[in-house]
Each structure stands twice: as C-alpha cells, then as structure tokens.
Amino acid sequence: MRGHFDDELAKLNNSLIEMGALIEDAIARAARALENQDVETARGVLAGDDRIDDKEKEIESRCLRLLIGQHPVARDFRQISTALKMITDMERIGDQAADICEICLELSGRPYIPKLEPSPLMADATMRMVTRSIDAYVKKDADLAQDVIESDDDVDRLYLAVRAELIDLVHEDPANGEQAFDLMQIAKYFERIGDHACNIAEWVIFFLTGRHKDQQVF
Amino acid sequence: MNVFDITDLNLWYGKFQALQNINMSASEAEITALIGPSGCGKSTLLKTLNRMNDLVPGCRVTGSVCLSGMDIYGNLNVNDLRKRVGMVFQKPNPFPMSVYDNIAFGPRTHGVKSRYALDEAVENSLKAAAIWDEVKDRLRKSALGLSGGQQQRLCIARALAVKPEVLLLDEPTSALDPISTGKIEELLLELKNDYSIIIVTHNMQQATRISDQTAFFLLGEMIEYDSTEKIFSMPQDKRTEDYVTGRFG
C-alpha cells in the first residue's frame, strides 16, 4: 500500500548514510593532514567539500518532496524532520573539516614548534562522536545517541586542556604565538564538530522517542 | 468541562458487537475527531451520541453516555437530546423546500411560531454557517439549487437553528471539492468557540488541521485517544502508528 513511500524513505536513509560517510572521511583526512602536514590531503578535503554540499541539497530536496507528496505523520514525520535537521549539522561538520585544512595549508612549510604539535586526542574523540551519532541514526539506537551527547563533555575538557597548554606556551615564549593561535583555532573547530555531533544525536533521540533535549515536543 | 462522558459503552447490532467497552470524554469548545478504517465503529459511536441507533432494529446498548452529566439513555427525552445534539451527514441532505424553510424547520418543530423569531433564527444560523451572504437574496428559492458545498453549509445552519450544544458530523466533506472542504473546515474552527464538535473523518489531514483531540478506533475498540498532535506525531500504540502512516486501513 505504501511501497513507493517506503522505497523513498529507504533512499533517504541511504543518502544520509552516504553523507555520513563523506563527513567521517573528511574529518579523518583533515586529522591526517594536520598530523602529517600533508598538503595534498588537505587540498583533497577542501575540494571534496562540494560533494558534501551537493549531498545536503539532494537530501533536502528529497525531504521536501516527501513532505509535500506524502504528508508524513508519526514515525515517518519524525524521520523526515530529523533528516532535515541532521543534514544542517552534517554540512557544518564538512565545512569545519575544510576550515581545519585551510589552516593546515597556512601552516605548511613551517614545521611544528616542539611541544606545540597538535594533539590527536581531540581529533579522535570528535571523529568517534560523529561516527557514533550517524550509527545511532542508522541502527535506531537511542542509547548510543545518548552516549554521544554525554561524551561531548570529554571533548570540551580536551579543548580546555589544549587551550591552557597553548596559553602556557605563549607565556613561555611569545614567538610561539602565531602558531599557537592557529592551533587554538583548529582545536575550536574540533570542539564545534563535537557540538554538531551532539545536535545530530539529539535529533536521533527525537526521531526515536519524540523527545528533544529532554522535552516532549508534542 | 466535558460535554460528553462515555463510560463502559458496549453496543450490539443483533449478535454483532459494534462497540466494545468505550471510555472517553469530549470537552466543551473543542473539536474531537474519530478516525479509523471502515467498519471500526466510529460512525456507530457518533450515532449513539444522539441515539440515532435507537432506530436500528436489534440495536442494544450497555454502559452510560452522559451529556453534561445527564445519562442520555436514562431519563432524557430523545427529542430534547436531538435538539441539544445536532447531526450533519456525509451527503448534504437539504429538504426539498426553500432555503428559509430548511432552516426554520427545526425551530418550527420545537414550537417557534413568531415570524420575527423565525426570521432571526434563519439569519443568525445562516450567518453562523458562513453562507448568509451567498443565499440572502434567494431565501425563498429551493435549497436543492445550491452547490454541494453550499448545501452542506446549509445543513450545518439547519442544525445550528435549534441552538444545540454539540454538533456531530459524519464525514461532512467527503463529497465536497477542496475549496468547499476548506470553507467547512474554517467554519468548524469558528464554530468550536460556541459549540462542541465531534467529527468522523477518513481524511487524516483534515483531522490534523482542525481537531484538538483524536480517537482511533479499530474493530469496535477505541485503541488510542489523545491530543491530535500526539496521535499524529508520537502515537503510543503500534496499531495507531500503522493506521495513520497508511500501513493498513
């Protein structure tokens, strides 16, 4: 009876999984480019951001077509509105991976000052948040989404630790300032990626339970 | 305040049980929608609320249905009940008489004779049903000459003419085009300030657009009753979810 609608929902799901894979790959490559000062990889991430933007537009128009054509209600309505909200955060994650790569290009040719090398911890932690938030959607797992939300505090703590460390290094030698500032910005981008993963997880919980940020929406 | 309180209501047509242990209330100044697949009992429940099922041979009712606290199957006179609880049907059914006489029919039946009082009832009812401007110059002409949408609004005006407390509507727009449907829906939203409205509808979008509460029926049982927003966004019962999302029905 609703074969066509179910097919369309399956396509929407696949598109979201594909967009999730694109942003996970963008963050992983941004982290690699940062760690290895790998200019080629950084340029690849920047060039690939258009694909993420295109995917967002494709999913957006798929959702809008479903809204107008199917008048979804109940679980269908929550699934489609969740998809619409998720892609905004996913697209921003792609932008932030690209922003990190732009700074990598700025930093290229200038070896990292010893002790100032970017910590891979933040990159790992945020990448895990993003991967698990998308997994929570795919597996319809509200507990996993809740774990993602709770792990945001860990990322925030890592960010504050990196910030304190960079301030100390600038105090030690003001010549560290320029690079420290760039690395600070990168740390902030990772912290924001964590926030976006958190938003995604919150919408996954809405999809599965009707509650958003512990509020019953309806 | 509740206009209807239905408690442990069971209804049989002969040996067939059409309603099973229904417990629900309908509030004043709200629109309550009854939804469910064909044969689920929603129209039967509607007809129970002004005892139209009394006319069906072999119909038996147990439990209680209270209108503003009075059991309608107890001491309440059926004519008084139907004055207080008006009904509008799926197919517009104007009487084969003038627009004026259609509206004046109810008041006349209830003993209103004064020309002035009848004129006033006709004008007020037609205005309340948002059709006055369209018919005021043809009050003496046959109501059968009106369009389907106009006829249905005339039927609503006819129901309003006896000043009911509750308006029951059984799929009132299923025979109408989208513009006429829109006019009836707007009208019901206006009317709910002064009348309690209970509507049976097969149109899910209509229920979401106009109703405050929605009850879902299946095989004579009321499966779920909640705010319309909740029923259409986060239903609690899988059968409700499957019905509103079109997985059966």
Image: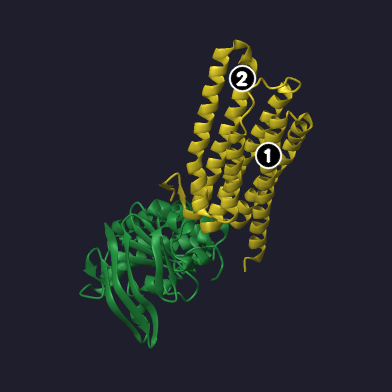
Chain colours: A yellow, B green
- Is residue A10 or residue A45 the one in the foreground? A45
Q: Helix, strand or loop at disc 2?
A: helix
Q: Helix, strand or loop at disc 1?
A: helix
In this rendering, the answer to whether B114 lies above or below A197 is: below
Crowding at label 2, few (<14), some or many (≥20) Cα neighbours within 10 Å?
many
Q: Earlier in the sequence, mark 2 or mark 1?
A: 1
Residue at 72% in and 31% down: A36
Residue at 40% in and 55% down: B212
In this rendering, the answer to whether A161 lies above or below B10 is: above
- Is residue B20 or residue A217 the one in the foreground? A217
Say whether residue B92 is visible.
no
Q: CA distance from mark 2 to mark 1?
A: 22 Å
Which chain does tag 1 point to?
A: A
Image spot of residue A170 (x, y percent): 57, 15
Circle 2 residue:
A180
Is A45 positioned to the left or the right of B131 in the image?
A: right
- Is residue A200 or residue B100 the one in the foreground? A200
Residue type at tag 1: Ala
Q: Are marks 2 and 1 on the same chain?
A: yes
Image spot of residue A168 (x, y percent): 53, 18
Circle 1 residue:
A28
Q: Quadrant of residue B21?
A: bottom left
Which chain does tag 2 point to?
A: A
Is A173 positioned to the left or the right of B47 in the image?
A: right
Residue type at tag 2: Ala
